[in-house]
Amino acid sequence: MKMKACLLALVAFVALTIFIGCEGGWTTGGGVDSWNERYNAVNFSGVYRRAGAGYLVSDYTGVGTVTEVVGNTSGGQAGGSVPPGPAAKTEGPIAVNGTTASRTLQFVPIVKGTLNVAAGGLTLTDSDGDGNLTGSPKGFGTIDYSSGFLYMNFEGTLIANYTVTYIQQAPTTSPGVTNFANSGLLSKPPVVPGSVTLSVGTTYVLRDNGVGGLVGSGITGTIDYKTGAWTIDYGSTVVPQGTDISAAYQSYGGEGRGTTGLDIFTFTVHHEGQYLRIVDNTGAVYEGRMGSIRSSLGQDPTEGEAIGGTLIAQFNATGTSKAGYPVTMAGTFQGEVITSTEANQVLSSRKMIGTWIESGGKTGDIVGDAAPITIYSPGQPTTPATTTEGTTTEVVPAETTNI
């Protein structure tokens, strides 16, 4: 209760700070404030999702850093083992909505000619064992037998689930050493992308590259952030049998849901002027406003200054969730300003980071990413724009923002 009270007080303070910060940058008349075009110097509109397909609003009481032994080189996950002979594997069903799909299969290497994909009414197989998939009645694709990377083209939009079956190649062993692919599960998914380190004894270390790959010296692997499933492919590297495999990573905690009643996976953000409208995947709407916007170089885009580096914009929003809880959100939007080869400015690495507080319900962390967006185009008109606020009219320089 004390923690919740402290968080509510903190969010209220942030919201007040944002309000005061916004007021300081607006011209008002008759006690009324309205849309300010200067805030369109940046654009945080877009769809925000958790990397790795996890909960966008996750459990505030997440377990944080986890360190555990997850297996050894004589077997797979602790408590299990890699079968001594070829093993049939099944992955799925996995949802697909589009013309293509890709996935890194967990259990490698794969026996050539054994892969089969059932996707709706389509079937894709590698019957020739050359890494190419042939579809029936249509479709094609490829499979990398060593890494497990699977690519599929359905030759048309497919809305269905697909299931992959294949046979994992038996490990090759010799006395005292091992040379095969290990696999297993982390105990506390979902996992924070970029936070995973797998250590094979004290000699070999694989680090998470943030997009599902594990990279080490002479060995590679994969990590599924949502399920915690991991693989290691030793390639030509030989390591002693019975060597422990340990993992260190950041977990979003247990179940991962930071909301009451319904899961939230996406926020669609509409950013216009200093105002925000946020719609979650359940259809609930939250209204709010942007506060101060600053760059890591000390620039203020709302004052017409050139921008570069990392942008950080405060925000707060309120609304009612589909579960019926009054919700307050407060935090920051962030992005990296990049100048492309066409001299446009692009806001990349866009993130939404904040706190979700339900009155009488849960408290959660908001962590989401959105695609890059162009925020400057040299061909934009340069005529002045007018902002009318209450009974006072303020003329501001035209924005060169492509919203």
Image (cartoon, rainbow, N blue to C red):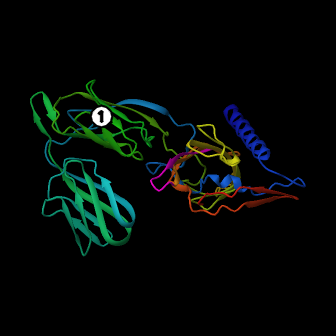
Query: Based on the displayed image, in which of its 4 quarters is residue 71 positioned?
Result: top left
- Horizontally, residue 273 falls left or right of residue 55, namely right
Q: Residues within 10 Å of mark 1 (few under 14, many from 20)?
A: some
How far across and how far down the image is residue 267, in percent?
58, 55
Farthest residue to the top: give it.
202
Please provide percent x and percent y for residue 378. 56, 58
Q: Quadrant of the C terminus?
A: bottom right
Q: Give the residue displayed 85% in from the left and 55% down from the top.
A: 32
State which quadrant residue 127 falls in: bottom left
Q: At which x and y percent is residue 263?
A: 55, 53
- Residue 16 lies, with reference to residue 217, above or below; the image says below
Q: Residue 325 versus residue 239: which sits nearer the camera?
A: 239
164, 198: nearer the viewer: 198
* Residue 257 among magenta residues: no
Q: Quadrant of the N terminus?
A: top right
All told, the count of numbered labels is 1
Helix, strand or loop for disc 1: loop
Reply yes or no: does residue 340 show up in magenta.
Answer: yes
Query: Mark 1 is on which residue type?
Result: Ala
Q: In terms of secondary structure, what is the magenta stretch mainly?
A: strand
What stretch of residues is rendered in magenta?
331-343
Residue ID at (81%, 54%): 33
172 above or below 177?
below
Residue pictured at 46% horizontal, 48% vertical: 51
- Please tell me whether residue 61 is drawn above or below residue 317 in the rendered image: above
Residue 215: where, in percent of width, then height? Answer: 30, 38
